[in-house]
């Protein structure tokens, strides 16, 4: 059974930084692309970033490009999201997701498993 457990969320002032982590178990982690999504109250879940199986390819939503960095450590079964220059509009629950293939895109349906989410709140 695949499990994804996120951590690292919290309350931060605008302009600050947070690093989210997602530890995966129950799968051959290095075989799958991974992604981060977020969902704000009253809004649909939206794509944030994705990384392929070996970390060699990454892709970001325009809204976070240049501020967020996705990375992974296959030895630790962990994917990270470094978030810098945070804005109030980044406030959301952030979800880690496991792709169905070695490399994934930006749609929710391309991801097979999801974590429980971690809350990020940015105060302005």
Image (cartoon, rainbow, N blue to C red):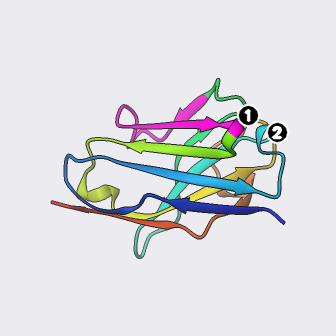
Q: Nearer the viewer, residue 95 or 104?
A: 95
Q: Which mark is residue 95?
A: none
Q: Residue at x 42, y 38 (%)?
A: 62
User: What residue does disc 2 label?
Assistant: 31
* For residue 64, above or below residue 58: below
The residues colored magenta run 58-75
Label whose residue precedes the other's in the sequence (1 or 2): 2
User: What residue does disc 1 label?
Assistant: 53
Q: Secondary structure at mark 1?
A: loop
Determine the CA span between mark 1 and mark 2. 6 Å
Tell whether 78 sits left or right of 92: right
Q: Nearer the viewer, residue 68 or 89?
A: 68
Q: Nearer the viewer, residue 22 or 67?
A: 22
Contact? badges 1 and 2 (CB < 8 Å): yes
**Is 63 colored magenta in this rendering?**
yes
* For residue 89, above or below residue 30: below
Category of crowding for the residue at label 1, using alpha-carbon neighbours closer than 10 angstroms: few (below 14), some (14–19), many (at least 20) = many
Q: How many marks?
A: 2
């Amino acid at each position: 059974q695949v499990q994804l457990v996120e951590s690292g969320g919290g309350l931060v002032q605008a302009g600050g930084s947070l690093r989210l982590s997602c530890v995966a178990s129950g799968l051959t982690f290095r075989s799958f692309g991974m992604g981060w999504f977020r969902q704000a109250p009253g809004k649909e879940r939206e794509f944030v970033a994705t990384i392929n199986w070996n970390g060699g390819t990454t892709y970001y939503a325009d809204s976070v490009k240049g501020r967020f960095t996705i990375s992974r450590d296959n030895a630790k079964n962990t994917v990270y999201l470094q978030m810098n220059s945070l804005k109030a509009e980044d406030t959301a629950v952030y979800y880690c997701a496991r792709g169905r293939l070695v490399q994934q895109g930006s749609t929710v349906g391309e991801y097979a498993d999801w974590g429980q989410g971690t809350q990020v709140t940015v105060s302005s």
